[in-house]
Image (tube, helix red, strand yellow):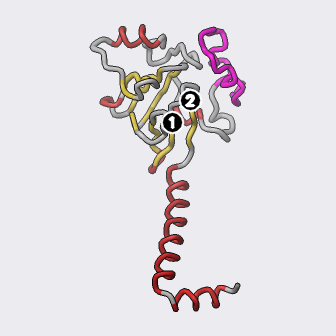
Amino acid sequence: MSTRILLSRLKAHPLALTLFGACFGAVVLLAAHNRLTGDAVILPNGMVVKKQLGARTALFSTDGMTRLASNIEFVCFNDRYVWVESLDRNETGLFDNISNSRVSSSSLSDMYRLSGLTGNRRACNGYSTSMLGPELLFDGNKPPFQPSCDSQNIANPSLKQRGWFDRPCTE
């Protein structure tokens, strides 16, 4: 059916024209939303790191919808926890994939001990031995925008998602 015939039939039925316009608009908005929100990666613990509008990177719960922290500068993660260093220091903290929320504790050392992640801006005892910029995690990155192969924490026997180490890295 040609476009001209389709449009003439839609004009004859105002409700059909309205529905067609709404559907077309929804498709355009969905495409724009996907383009603007950019990449996403699911961490081994099920939490999601996404690029958002303005190239900001955020941490989302395991449902992929609930934002937990934004403006991520560095991440460290294992099979349960994610430590986030945010440009907005109010969003820096430890997040638990079981409660899908921030771990509240008065002591940083308690959080590091609880999570098994190292409490140092440079060091990590998760899937990486160093804190990573979140943009290094996205699929399709080419060197030098990939994590270092030397930083993979293969020696940590507590990590269960061993396939994570098959991801591309830079020698």
Query: In whole angstroms, how far apart are the C-alphas of marks 1 and 2?
Result: 7 Å
Secondary structure beneath label 1: strand
Residue 65 appears at what percent x and percent y? Answer: 45, 42
User: Which of the image's four quarters has the C terminus?
Assistant: top right
Q: Residue 34: give x, y in percent of width and height.
A: 54, 54
User: Which residue is outermost to the left?
Assistant: 106
- The three-letter code of the residue at mark 1 reads Val
Q: Which stretch appears magenta?
A: 148-171
Q: In terms of depth relative to the viewer, which is nearer, 47 or 127?
A: 47
- Name which of mark 1 and mark 2 comes first in the sequence: 2
Tell me the residue that label 1 is attached to.
49
Q: Amino acid at mark 2?
A: Leu
Q: Quadrant of the N terminus?
A: bottom right
Q: Dot 2: what SS?
A: loop
Nearest to the observer: residue 122 or residue 32: 32
- Residue 22 position, x and y percent, is 47, 72
Q: State whether residue 132 is above or below residue 8.
A: above
| Left or right, residue 168 beside residue 55 | right
Q: Is residue 95 above or below residue 38?
A: above
Exactly how many numbered labels are in the figure? 2
What numbered label is drawn on residue 43?
2
